Image (cartoon, rainbow, N blue to C red):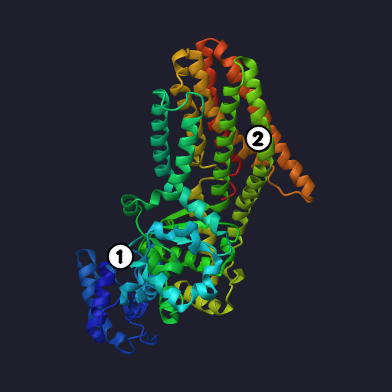
Amino acid sequence: DILQAMLCDSCERACSIQPCAFGTSHGNFSSVATGDAESPREGHGQQTSNVKDHEVSGLQGMLAPGGTAAAALRMPSEPAATTSLGLPLCLPQGEVQRLHDHNRISSRARHSGRTLSDDGSLLRAVSLGHLLGGFGSHFKTSSLTGTANSIEVAETVYNRSFQVNNISRFVSHSWMDSRMDKYIALVIHMNLWGATACSVIFASAAACLQWYDHLPRHGPWCLATGYLSFLVGLATWHRLPAVSRLQGSFFLDKLCIHQTNQAMKKKGTESFASFLKRSEKMLMLWSPNYFKRLWCTLEIAALVQAHRQQRFGYGPVVVPLEFVPLTLAKTALVSWSIMFAVTCLHDVSVALSEPGIAKETNAFIVIAAVLIVSISPAAGALRRFCRERKNLSAQLENFRVEDADCTEEADRAIIMATVSNWYQNADDFNQCVRTVVRESIAQSIGEGNKYPWKLLVGIVLVRGFNELDNASRGLWADYEVPNALAALAFFPFSCSIMLLFVRLSWLFSKERKSRIADMLVSSFIGLSSLTYTAAVYWFIVAGLPRIPIGPALLLVALLFVLCLLLQCGMRRAGAACC
């Protein structure tokens, strides 16, 4: 760094030009250090060789330990070996290459940030409430064409964004994907914990009303109130002013870059790397279409370039990426709703049946009927996600920006020119996607086909609301320890059903040649999950309360361990996916 600063300073005095980042206006480092007058550089010409004797001799005295010039910097006429940049071998070759890379990256960094630095008003954002307004209406493909994208509408949309200094999340997505899929993924990702808090508050209020006989004792009041408030919380939590401030600002290209003013649109496109440099994270709404779209690859190029600039040195480039698969979010919502419907029907069936074992038999028949109808389609959807997840690895390993599709071919030249300004060539960018982006995705979602723990929250809540109903009816007052353990066992049991379901879907994810064969595979997954559900359910209901406390406690602990094993097993089986 000292050598860099003094060379730039000396070059400035010799050439009488403004200082700039090392290696751009002042020419190549090697021409200054070695005095190569036969290789003219931009902003130098013959003056570079005129300064070498005076400046290098000064550097020798300042940098050499004990004042020995030979240990600090050797002249080209000396026979001692030097590096490719004209530095002595006392500086490691890797460090020399690092400085050379820094020279190249710094030059590209200034270009990518120039538009934004000249006009700070380009950096704009919106609140999450505006982003998700109209159940994600801004994500509709039709909003990009026709009267929906007229000059007046585009001006109104752009003016609703506001100027910021930094962005909390840069939202990246493909316009080929469903608007509702993106909406569901965003509300689950951003509002899950707030919706959980809302549901617990409302379910507790219903339990109090039921306890004091303001509501009938027989009925799943806590379950219904809790789950419905959970869904409402998912859809509306971000609208609370205090929550909106905590969630920060969001960048969406359609809302924050003018869509009809071509000059502003071009400046905004060229400033993507600067936008991402000032963003805390990129929120990638992923689907199999994502890495096939040219605009999406531009955003990925900007993300990697921005953080190659920010973190230069040894070690890998780390990009702040939140990877949100659209299919997985939709699958989670469906699984929560199935669990809610099954539990509600179980409670109603138990309330209407005579006491005894026949009561549980009738309840299980109802549960089995619901699962048979719903579980096979759910298995088909989950198998599709597993195939997408497996194919993601191959998609990234074979990524080529030249193969990406673009709706408007006129945009291709602009995007490719922008990428060329950030990278040496297309192969350089392709390699970054195959390594840096691939590793960041693996870190974001976990290894292999790991099912995120937080997506089990809805299942745990449904089970908890059901036990809250039992407590408010006074059933817990009659519970002995074995009964309490049976109630506790339902929590890991409910989670293990989902994890087993995911595990089987991963193992049998391969698409069959005929549609009938594919449906049979999905039905097999459903029936296997149903068999496991029936066996463990009857054991918990009929067997667990009748065995001694010690073994019962051990069996409950084993159910928790089973959940961990299913999750860890999935991680090992899919470790090569990403």
- Is residue 512 rendered to the left or right of residue 546? right
Of residue 323 and residue 341, the one placed in the foreground of this image is 341
- Is residue 189 rendered to the left or right of residue 90? right
The answer to the question of whether label 2 and label 1 lie on touching residues, with beta carbons closer than 8 A, is: no
Of residue 497 and residue 6, the one placed in the foreground of this image is 497
> Residue 555: where, in percent of width, then height?
55, 19
Give above or below for 70 relative to 286. below
Q: Quadrant of residue 476?
A: top left
**Label whose residue precedes the other's in the sequence (2 or 1):** 1
* Residue 83 can be seen in this image: no
Give above or below for 343 relative to 452. above
Label 2 SS: helix
- Report, in whole angstroms, how far the alpha carbon at label 2 lies from the one at label 1: 52 Å
Residue drawn at the location 59% of the way across and 73% of the way down: 407
> Residue 2: where, in percent of width, then height?
25, 67
Label 1 SS: loop
Residue drawn at the location 58% of the way across and 27% of the way down: 348
Give above or below for 550 relative to 291. above
- Is residue 546 rendered to the left or right of residue 6? right
Label tally: 2
Going by the numbered disc 1, the residue's amino acid type is: Asn
> Residue 26: where, in percent of width, then height?
32, 80
Density class for disc 1 (Cα within 10 Å; few <14, some 14-19, many ≥20) is: few
Going by the numbered disc 2, the residue's amino acid type is: Val
Which circle marks residue 165 in the picture? Answer: 1
Q: Which residue is mark 2?
A: 370
* Residue 269 can be seen in this image: yes
Quadrant that contains the N terminus: bottom left
> Residue 456: where, in percent of width, then height?
51, 38
